[in-house]
Amino acid sequence: MAPGKTMEPFWWSLFSVGGVVAAFLVPVHLFLHGLAIPLGWVSVGHGRLLALVGQPLVKIYLFVLIALPLYHWAHRFRFILEDLGLHGFRAPIAVLCYGSAIVGTVATLWVLIRV
Amino acid sequence: MSEARPQRPGLYYPKMPLTWWLARPGYVRFMIRELTSVFIAIFLVELLVLVHKVGQGPQAYADTAARLQSPGWMVFHVVALAFALYHTITWFKLTGVVQVVRLGDHKVPPALVVAGTFVAWGVVSLFILYWLLVRS
């Protein structure tokens, strides 16, 4: 990389896209899978879910829904740790946060391809 | 400890207590906004596990779904939903500041841009509910 250039814009754009995805899509899924289904307000059978997750478009949707906000988390969590005073560990914190998001992305791909 | 040396020695970091963000309500709101991402990420990992279990068959899915009905998980879901809504609200309010929308020579008022994102959010959410629950 040229001197003075950083990866910052790349991670920031993933943070931003992940933030948009989380803002639009996460509340309704939390309501549905976290409250409505467990509390029995609505019911979605296993057969219907299996048919859904088998569709390519649904797989792409789930990849966007799950993987992109992980980079949003990584960016914010990185700066939570730095803001709490861990400036001496900037590099390991960045590797840990973005690395976790990359591991999460691979895991998401693995699950969605197999399911 | 030489490895603890900052990578950018030119930057000055003031020594702050770990609880600096408790000093002002605005700082606390900032910290809460940053923390929303943690709850959202945990839920998405939970969702990924659920998808994985769906693929493993009806029994595996039913077992996991039953475990997620426990009081501890339900408390987590309620708290996480509150954090997720806080993320959505703060994110959309920021778009009004960050994203300038122009129609010809006119600048659309930021309040209108923010209102537009909330309407779009409502439409998207209702569509997902409809698609999962009604259409089959």
Image (cartoon, coloured by chain):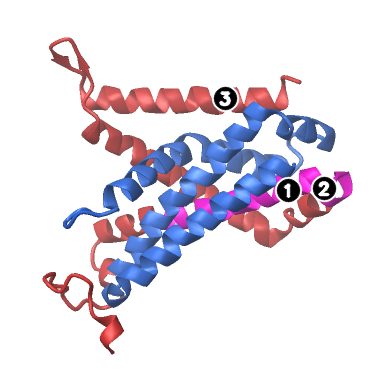
Chain colours: A blue, B red
The amino acid beneath tag 2 is: Gln
The image position of residue B119, as x and y in percent, is 42, 23
Q: Is residue A85 above or below residue A61?
A: below
> Neighbour class for label 2 at 10 Å: few (<14), some, many (≥20)?
some
Q: Which residue is mark 3?
A: B126
Residues indicated by labels 2 and 1 sit on the same polypeptide chain? yes
> Neighbour class for label 1 at 10 Å: few (<14), some, many (≥20)?
many
The reply to whether residue A98 is visible in this rendering is yes
Q: Chain of mark 3?
A: B
The image position of residue B118, as x and y in percent, is 40, 28
Instruction: Give the main secondary structure of the magenta stretch.
Output: helix
- The Cα–Cα distance between marks 1 and 3, rounded to whole angstroms, is 25 Å
The amino acid beneath tag 3 is: Leu
Residue shown at 69% from the left, 52% from the top: B49
Q: Are marks 2 and 1 in contact (CB under 8 Å)?
A: yes
For label 3, the SS is: helix
User: For residue A95: magenta?
Assistant: no
Residue shown at 83% from the left, 54% from the top: B63
Could you say which disc has been placed on residue B52 in the image? 1
The image position of residue A110, as x and y in percent, is 66, 48
Give the magenta range.
Answer: B35-62
The amino acid beneath tag 1 is: His
Q: Chain of mark 1?
A: B
Name the quarter where the C terminus of chain B is drawn.
top right
Q: Which residue is mark 2?
A: B56
The tag earlier along the polypeptide, 2 or 3, is 2
